Amino acid sequence: MSGRDPFCQPRRIHRGAALTLVFAGVLIAGAATGSFPEPDGPARKAVAGPVGPASRHEAVEEAAAEAMADGKSPMEAAERAVSRSGDRWGAVYSEGEYEEFQDALDGRYTGVGLWARQEPDGRIEVTKVQPGSPAAAAGIRTGDRLRSVDGDRVDGRPVTEVIALLRGDAEDDPAGTTVTLGLQRGTRAWSETLHRARLSTDSVTARRLPDGVTVLKISAFTKGSADAAREALRAAPADGRTVLDLRGNSGGLVTEAVRTASAFLDGGLVATYDVDGDQRSLHAAPGGDTARPLVVLVDGGTMSAAELLTGALQDRGRAVVIGSRTFGKGSVQMPTKLPDGSVAELTVGHYRTPSGHTVDGRGITPDLEAGPWPLRRAARVLAGLGDAS
């Protein structure tokens, strides 16, 4: 059994609606999911009273089984049981949705290849077009205004909802289905009908600032992101100042976050967590680069696995953290397969930073505020770190 951490996910209310918001995170800030290492032994062996995590799993399983026996929907029964459990991060997925959930962890998604943001006046603006995507083939550019999706106007709508419309329902709108976009560039307004496609995310990018600072941006901890980060660091100057930009990183695979921590730490504790009361720990591998001056940029969109990494680097004195308080999602979810193939995920524990600080509901407080120009602030701090070394 593998643990999962859907830290940015709203609880599922009806089939496909909320889940598309989860998967939309792949386009905006990376996969909104995560995974803890598989625990040794039974996953739910410790139960503290009748409302413990194991009891909640059993209640959901029993509700689904009874519904199946009565000829009713196990998935709907499980959703009601999860709602009654009071588990803020509990969720129920159809079989197809869960497969797409796992694809998101692998850095794959179905969509058209657009990133977007909402401007102060409510307009939705394209911020990035993925090369080789349907959007790129249609000639859509960064800066274009997105006015509508399949005839529905999007001005003023949360950007997560807009991206969800682009992606469609996990089961009803697979690759090959069409979506029509209303667009505007300057005074020109037009529409494009695109075919959704299976695409891969580019969760790690690196660039050099004019002053020589390397900016390593990780938008999500999807499969292979730690290797990509290490490769980018190897290509940077060995003693170069580095900004690890985790702003908007809604998390991902915790194992990838720990491996990324290993690039900057010479072994040691990264985090502790519990599974049904059984205490466990995550450690960095030895041999990381501990000399490179490092700043971590965070904001309110920095979540879960990204918070775990930030907390490790901050508590271990490895980096100066700049920005605003992070989201505060530090709970551990485990999946349970139901009779109809759907999957329920319920919270079984929480993780803590090396100093023992709880992240869930609190977030991580940065060492310094970012101000209006975060990268400039980071560069100034790095210059001081370089002088100090």
Image (cartoon, grey):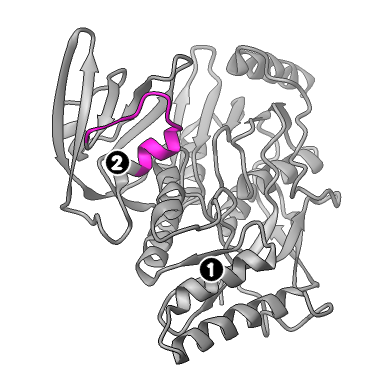
Quadrant assignment, res 52: bottom right
Residue at the disc numbered 2: 166
In the image, taking residue 247 as reference, residue 320 lies left or right, namely right
Q: Secondary structure at mark 1?
A: helix
Q: Is residue 272 magenta?
A: no
Q: Residues within 10 Å of mark 1 (few under 14, many from 20)?
A: many
Residue pictured at 45% horizontal, 31% vertical: 206
Q: Secondary structure at mark 2?
A: helix
Which numbered circle lies on residue 314?
A: none
Residue pictured at 72% horizontal, 73% vertical: 53
Residue 138 visible in rendering: no
Instruction: Give the quarter of the figure containing the C terminus.
Output: top right
Q: Residues within 10 Å of mark 2 (few under 14, many from 20)?
A: many
Magenta range: 151-164
- Is residue 139 depicted above or below 381 in this figure? below
Image coordinates of residue 40 in percent, x first then y, are: 67, 80
- Is residue 168 depicted above or below 163 in this figure? below
Residue pictured at 53% horizontal, 27% vertical: 215
- At label 1, the amino acid type is Glu
Quadrant assignment, res 181: top left
Residue pictured at 43% horizontal, 78% vertical: 73
Which numbered circle lies on residue 79?
A: 1
